[in-house]
Image (tube, helix red, strand yellow):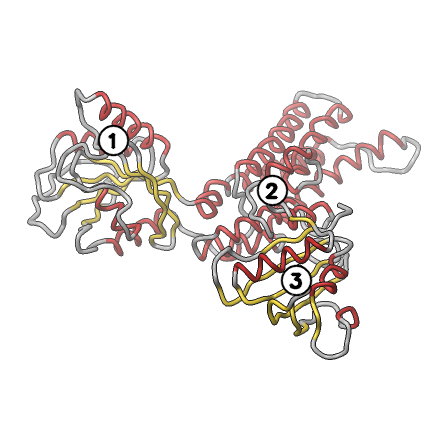
Amino acid sequence: MSDTIAAIATPAAPSAIGILRLSGPEAISALSAVFRPLGNKPLTAHEDRNLVLGTLLGPSGEVIDQALATFSHGPHSYTGEDTAELHCHGSPAVLALGLEALFVQGVRQAGPGEFTRRAFLNGRLDLTQAEAVADLIDAETPAAVRQAAGQLSGALSRRVRAIYDGLTDLLAHFHAVLDYPDEDIDPFRADTIRESLDRAVEELRTLLATYQRGKYIAGGVPCVLVGRPNAGKSSLLNALVGYDRAIVTDIPGTTRDTVEARCVLGGVALRLIDTAGIRDTDDAVERMGVERSKAALEEAALALVLWDGSVPMGEEDVALLERAMAHGPVILMRTKADLPSKPMPVLGLDPMPPVVAVSAQTGMGLDRLGEVIAQLFPAGSGDAAGELLTNARQADAAKRALAGVKRAVENLAAGVTPDALLTDVEEALSALGELTGANIREDITARIFERFCVGK
């Protein structure tokens, strides 16, 4: 990381403000070369983190904008290196010329996530905090913002550190007794060791239990719309997302493949999956769509089962509802509520799923649907914000840590000598280290930062 990087840190569209960001040993000198402060005071004579008004120069030294500049010396900066920023007017042409001027000074284009990656490698952020940066950028709901902001502030890191420190103390005691037998150190006691291990098991189980809620808050709830042909699935999808995402016709079997879109309803981010109408058919293409619908139903975390309320509920509707209930939470959607409705039969289901009457034409019932979804997927209290596992990498590391501690508990109960437990505890510590990035391979690090945008 001996070179200096630069990137446009704001979206590539006209806006009021555009930002050019630099990091590296030549960040401040490169900034000084393309920025002329108003007055006679050189840029480097100003204090760190102060905004300085001046003019931005283009690749040939011509004035291209009036801008604000700021810089910060490492290690007390976002990346831990010397950093600088130019706050320009948000013209893509101005930003492109400003970036080109920096390249003339020997600065290179930053890669996706390279600023945050440098912050991680320089110890300014651990890996869970670095992942929170991307989550915060992608956040679609207030709950996702609170979770990402809490994780960025170190809430998850502190929770993991508490478990890590407890196991480290146990391991240190092992080594102290084994390596210094002549010292006056408290001997091993099986009940004390068991107490420490049991506490770690419980803490790791509690941490792992946060994953399902955390991944839904951060990534959205997979929500499938299923029903017989012409039940109104595509119309409801379009009403939820606010535009014509799916084709709607009166012809049964219009939807042949799954159609996906995202929306926020009831404060919950939904990954909507519109499916082909489920029915028996001789059409080979439609039959493939039906099979994909069934697969989507099995993988979804929430199923909206649609019944056309303007016609009597048939045996196929009931069978589909029961099938969906076997896989997880279900909401029975009584569609076309703007038309004269037929009475719903007594189904005798236990428990009976919530029923919501909706009209995709008028929007009736959509607010009620949001309320029901919010009850099924609560955001949780603000006290736990930032302490949830939010992705599969984190969950896998916690799962392997739990497995290592559980093996240690089992071996202790089997009468294995304390020194033989060292391997199990060390494996658990190694997995916990992966969670925060203390023990992480370079290829895994590269994969994690691939999802970041350029300039962050």
* Residue 252 image offset from top left, x and y in percent: 15, 33
Crowding near pointer 1: few (<14 within 10 Å), some, many (20+)? some
Inspect the image, locate mark 2, and give the three-letter code of the amino acid beneath it.
Phe
- How many marks are shown on the rendered structure? 3
Q: Quadrant of residue 274?
A: top left
Inspect the image, locate mark 1, and give the three-letter code of the amino acid beneath it.
Arg
Q: Secondary structure at mark 1?
A: loop
Q: Which mark is residue 85?
A: 3
Residue occupied by mark 1: 256
215 or 202: nearer the eye? 215
Crowding near pointer 2: few (<14 within 10 Å), some, many (20+)? some
Q: Secondary structure at mark 3?
A: strand
* Residue 61 image offset from top left, x and y in percent: 68, 64
Q: Is residue 275 left or right of residue 196?
A: left
Crowding near pointer 3: few (<14 within 10 Å), some, many (20+)? many
Q: Is residue 292 left or right of residue 90?
A: left
* Residue 448 image offset from top left, x and y in percent: 59, 39
Residue at 77%, 61% in the rendered image: 29
**Whole-number angstrom distance, CA of label 1 to CA of label 3:** 50 Å
Label 1 or label 3, whichever comes before in sequence order:
3
Residue at 19%, 22% in the rendered image: 283
27 or 395: nearer the eye? 27
Residue at 38%, 55% in the rendered image: 267
Inspect the image, locate mark 3, and give the three-letter code of the amino acid beneath it.
Glu
Given the current orientation, which residue lies at the most extreme right position? 182
Residue 178 vertical placement versus 44 (above, below): above
* Residue 196 image offset from top left, x and y in percent: 68, 38
Label 2 or label 3, whichever comes before in sequence order:
3
**Whole-number angstrom distance, CA of label 2 to CA of label 3:** 22 Å
Q: Which mark is residue 95?
A: none
Residue occupied by mark 2: 449
